[in-house]
Amino acid sequence: MACAHCTDAGRVFDDRTARWEARRFRWFGPSRPTKHLLRAVEARIGDSGTLLDVGGGVGTIPRILADRMASGTAVDASSAYLAVARSDAERHGFDGRMTWIEGDFLDVRDQVAEHDAVTLDRVICCYPDMESLVRETAERARRVYVLVFPREGLLNRIAFPLTNLLLRIRGSAFRTFMHSTSRVDEAAVSRGLALVEVRRTLLWQVRVYEREEMQGTHDG
C-alpha cells in the first residue's frame, strides 16, 4: 500500500525498535495477550499444522510454535522486523520451514496460500483499512483465525488520541486505530468463520474464530 501511513510505519518499526522488541522477548517472554493467542492455536492445529503470521514483528509466534508447526509463513511490512525474526529462526533451526514475505499484506496477498492457523497479534490497530485486511487474511485460515487488538475501553479511548497527537507533533504520518469490535467480527464472519472464544486483558482482547466446518474437531 503506497501511502504516507505505510511509509512511516517503516520508520516507526525500525532496526532499533526491532532489536529492543527481541531483547524484551528474550527477557520476559510473550505478553499475556500473546500467550492467550498461542494457547488457542496450540489447541487447534495439532502437531503438524501450518501457520500464517501477519505483522508478526520479531517472530515471537512462529518461534514458540516451531516444534508444532509443519511449515509457516511470516508477512511483515518492516524489513527490520523480518530480518530479526529470520535471524532468530536460523539460530533455532526452523528457518528452513519458514517463508518470509516483506510488504503490506494487501499488496502481497497473491503470494500467500491458505494455512491451518492465521494470526494477527496487535496488527489491525496499526492498519487503516481494517475490513480489507481482516477479510483477506481470514480467507486464508483453514482451521483457526486469531486476532489481538485493543478493547474499546476508557483507557484506550484516551490513549489512542494522545498517541496520534504525539505522532502528529513529531511529523509522522503513521497513526494507530481503535477499530469497532463488532465490525471486526462482521469482517471475519463474512469469510465463513465463527467466533468461538474471547479473552481480555486490561487493554487488549483476543478473539478466536474457527472455520465453521471445523468446529468441534480440534484437540483439547
Image (cartoon, rainbow, N blue to C red):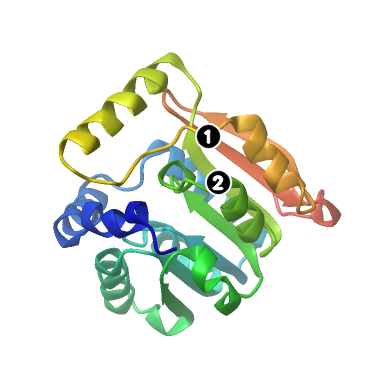
Instruction: State how far apart marks 2 and 1 are (Cα).
Output: 7 Å
Where does residue 87 sit, x and y in percent of width and height?
26, 74
Residue drawn where x is 82% and y is 51% of the image: 212
- Mark carried by residue 179: 1
Relative to 138, residue 69 above or below: below
Residue at the far top: name it: 154
Mark closest to the chain's N terminus, 2 or 1: 2
Relative to 79, residue 201 above or below: above
Camera-side residue of 74 and 162 = 162
Residue drawn where x is 30% and y is 79% of the image: 90
Where does residue 116 sit, x and y in percent of width and height?
66, 65
Relative to 123, residue 151 above or below: above
Residue drawn where x is 35% and y is 18% of the image: 158
* Image quadrant in which you'd find residue 77: bottom left
**In what element is the residue under mark 1?**
loop
Which class describes the residues within 10 Å of circle 2: few (<14), some (14-19), or many (20+)? some
Q: Amino acid at mark 1?
A: His
Looking at the rendered image, the quarter that the N terminus falls into is bottom left
Q: Amino acid at mark 2?
A: Met
Where does residue 166 sit, x and y in percent of width and height?
21, 32
**Do the CB atoms of the residues marked 2 and 1 lie less than 8 Å apart?**
yes
- Mark carried by residue 130: 2
Callout count = 2
Which class describes the residues within 10 Å of circle 1: few (<14), some (14-19), or many (20+)? many
- Mark carried by residue 23: none
Residue drawn where x is 76% and y is 54% of the image: 191
Q: Is residue 192 left or right of residue 198?
A: right
